Image (cartoon, grey):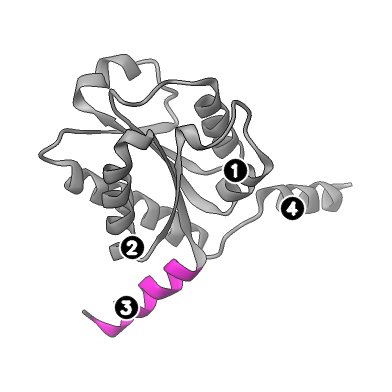
């Protein structure tokens, strides 16, 4: 691999993480996505849906805030919950790209998804290839940001500047 690409990947890996939410039954899929992200130079915050309560915690908020994008792996194992809606809403409020990696059999169930959420359909045969699409989107966001941004601090600074 080109030394410049290795340096770029290491720079991204040190700076940017991707928040991945999934059902604990889909841990293997989450690990595949984690590996694909790692190959692209990203770390991943893997958080299974059952690992936290019914309200979004401060820790989860901080983890989402420190991520470059939010990915939800949606399969038949996934139980839709208000917590997921809270996490997606929080990620979007922070300006993070949200990606729904959805099993082909469930695609009809997500037709009402917010237009700002990228929907990537997968099946068992193309899951890894679709994970590469997710990693490419994360890479686009990292290149746009170049540096992680604390949106709340920026808005606070901008508001004070305008007064």
7 drawn magenta: yes
The numbered mark, 3 or 4, whose residue comes first in the sequence reads: 3
Q: What element carries label 4?
A: helix
Q: What element carries label 3?
A: helix
39 drawn magenta: no
Task: Using the image, tell me which numbered label, if any, was put on residue 60.
Answer: 1
Quarter assignment of residue 79: top left
Disc number lying in front (4 or 1): 1
Q: Are marks 2 and 3 in contact (CB under 8 Å)?
A: no
Secondary structure mainly formed by the magenta segment: helix
> Residue 47, image x and y in percent?
47, 43
Furthest-bottom residue in view?
3
> Cα distance, mark 4 to mark 2?
29 Å
The residue that appears at 32% across and 34% down in the rendered structure is 25
Q: Name the residue under label 3.
A: 6
Mark 3, Cα crowd under 10 Å, few <14 / some 14-19 / many 20+, is few
Q: What stretch is highlighted in magenta?
A: 2-14
Compared with 30, 49 (above or below) is above
The numbered mark, 2 or 3, whose residue comes first in the sequence reads: 3
Q: Name the residue under label 2.
A: 38
The residue that appears at 46% across and 33% down in the rendered structure is 49
Residue 129 in view (yes/no): yes
Q: Is residue 28 left or right of residue 55?
A: left
Q: Is residue 23 left or right of residue 85?
A: left
The numbered mark, 4 or 2, whose residue comes first in the sequence reads: 2
Furthest-right residue in view?
163
> Residue 57, image x and y in percent?
65, 38
Task: Using the image, tell me which numbered label, if any, was put on residue 153.
Answer: 4
**Closer to the camera, 134 or 74?**
74
Residue 100 in view (yes/no): no
């Amino acid at each position: 691999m080109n030394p410049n690409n290795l340096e770029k990947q290491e720079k991204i890996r040190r700076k940017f993480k991707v928040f991945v939410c999934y059902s604990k039954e889909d841990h293997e899929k989450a690990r595949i996505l984690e590996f694909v992200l790692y190959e692209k130079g990203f770390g991943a915050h893997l958080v299974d849906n059952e690992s936290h309560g019914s309200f979004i915690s401060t820790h989860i908020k901080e983890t989402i805030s420190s991520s470059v994008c939010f990915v939800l792996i949606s399969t038949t194992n996934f139980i839709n919950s208000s917590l997921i809606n809270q996490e997606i809403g929080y990620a979007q409020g922070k300006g993070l790209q949200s990606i729904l990696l959805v099993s082909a059999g469930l695609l009809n169930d997500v037709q009402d998804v917010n237009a700002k959420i990228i929907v990537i359909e997968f099946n068992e045969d193309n899951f890894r290839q679709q994970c590469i699409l997710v990693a490419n989107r994360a890479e686009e966001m990292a290149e746009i940001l170049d540096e992680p941004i604390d949106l709340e601090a920026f808005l606070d600074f901008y508001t004070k500047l305008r007064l």
